[in-house]
Image (cartoon, helix red, strand yellow):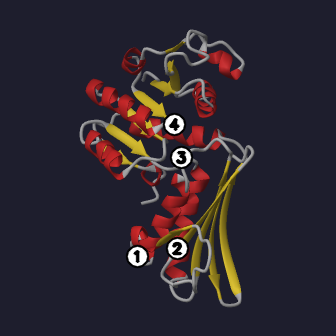
Amino acid sequence: MNPLRIAIAGASGRMGRMLIEAVLNDSEVVLAAAFDRAGAPFVGRDAGELVGSACGVMVTDDVRAAIAAADCVIDFTRPEGTLVHLGIARELGKAMVIGTTGFSAAEKETIVAAAKEIPVVFAPNMAVGVNAVFKLLQVAARILDEGYDVEVIEAHHRFKVDAPSGTALRMGEVVARELGRNLDECAIYGREGVTGERKPETIGFSTIRGGDVVGDHTVLFAGIGERIEITHKSGSRMPYALGSVRAARFLAGRKSGLFDMQDVLGLR
């Protein structure tokens, strides 16, 4: 059986480099292409140089050719770029793993529509540990469904452009669903001034941005006389990359469908 051919979007970026390293170190997949926007610093150079060892695959700005060379595209870029890449993958019949966050509701619908024709894993966080936390939150919310206030606290590096993080929002969604609430109606994003007493049905979000924090997430269940905290801290971006490659392998042989990491890990 031939190894799965993977193309990496945004190859010059922090996440792109991690993805290249993860693919090059996985015996079940091969790096078929690495691409970036025109004018990106590594276009025209060996993708392996980004992780310290030449591999013979050049970083290109020819997006169509890069996607055509692969079986699956892994994308952690920006919503506008990801949707362009998705359109090409859909046209060419290629699978796609999307770790990009910050999509609008309408943009998410574009992903849903594409998944009717190609297989897509779309998840706010690809790390296996984070997805274990999602499962733990389901259990905690069922148990702590009365008398506990829920707060989601997240911290990321200064360069992150969206807030709250996609992972924090998914954590809120998981808890809200288990509690029979609609997150759009009960979420509180930050507080200031005289806010009055906390309404028990709300789910609060607090966002921290600074330095080089890779990603910290905590869901706090605060009751009278006790607090339960479920926390995940990322020491590097490699867990996201490893999970993404695992997701790409999951899509191999599938014709279409929209999946997330809970599907990939068999946690449904």
Amino acid, disc 1:
Arg
Q: Nearer the viewer, residue 248 or 87?
A: 87
Amino acid, disc 4:
Phe
Q: How far apart are the two marked residues, 1 and 4, measured between alpha carbons?
A: 30 Å
Of marks 2 and 4, the one in the foreground: 2
**Residue identified by numbered label 1:** 181
Q: How far apart are the two marked residues, 2 and 1, measured between alpha carbons?
A: 10 Å
Earlier sequence position, callout 2 versus callout 1: 1
- Residue drawn at 56 percent across, 89 percent down: 147
State yes or no: discs 1 and 3 in contact (Cβ < 8 Å).
no
Residue 66, given in percent of the width and then of the height, sits at: 43, 17
Earlier sequence position, callout 2 versus callout 4: 4
**Residue identified by numbered label 3:** 126
SS at mark 4?
A: loop
Which image quarter: residue 153?
Answer: bottom right
Q: How far apart are the two marked residues, 2 and 3, measured between alpha carbons?
A: 24 Å
**Residue identified by numbered label 2:** 203
State yes or no: discs 3 and 4 in contact (Cβ < 8 Å).
no
- Residue drawn at 47 percent across, 50 percent down: 261
- Relative to 34, residue 229 above or below: below
Of marks 2 and 3, the one in the foreground: 2
**Residue identified by numbered label 4:** 76
